[in-house]
Image (cartoon, rainbow, N blue to C red):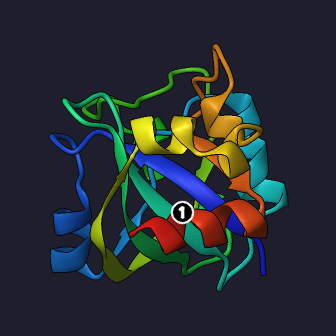
Amino acid sequence: MAYWLMKSEPDAYSIDDLERDGREPWDGIRNYQARNMMRDDMRIGDEVLFYHSSCKIPAVVGIARVASEPYPDPTQFDPDEKYYDAKSDPDDPRWILVDVEFVRKLDRPVTLTEIKEHPGLDDMILTRRGNRLSIMPVEKAHRDIILGLE
């Protein structure tokens, strides 16, 4: 099993939304590095740390699970969608996604400040300067520390 951190702005799609929906396509990824991780590295059953970003208190707020093989993101083909990509060809899709399913909310959010201040997490990708990826791998040791902080 691999571990991932996936960021979502809570006003766009929150852990509460995923809890309500149960399972949801992780659409709208328009970064090649993040796309490649979903396409090449994610497997059904991998654990996801659900992270609220671009909000007052960014934090890991829950756990989800990768619930599907990668498949083409349908929003890339629909001109009415926010994530439409006129250059993407249905016969050779540029963007893919995976479904994620809700596992649980954390007992309490583990904030970015806590993560940055914890000596065992100082080499986590999330804490690196300039990191803007919405999806990133997480080492099991880092995952265990974060869950230990909840």
In-image side of 19 versus 144 (left or right): left
**Local SS, label 1:** helix
Position of residue 69 measured from the top left corner of the image (x, y, whole percent)? 67, 75
Instruction: Out of 87 and 103, give the one closest to the viewer.
Output: 103
**Outermost top residue:** 130
**Residue under the image location 78 percent in, 60 percent down:** 139
The answer to which image quadrant residue 20 occupies is: bottom left
**Residue under the image location 67 percent in, 47 percent down:** 121
Position of residue 74 measured from the top left corner of the image (x, y, whole percent)? 46, 51
Q: Is residue 36 visible?
A: yes
In which quadrant will I find the N terminus? bottom right
In-image side of 109 versus 48 (left or right): left
**Residue under the image location 65 percent in, 85 percent down:** 45
Picture layout, residue 124 above or below residue 30: below
Residue behind mark 1: 146
Picture layout, residue 103 above or below residue 122: below
Query: Which kind of residue does numbered mark 1 sit on?
Result: Ile
Position of residue 83 measured from the top left corner of the image (x, y, whole percent)? 39, 31
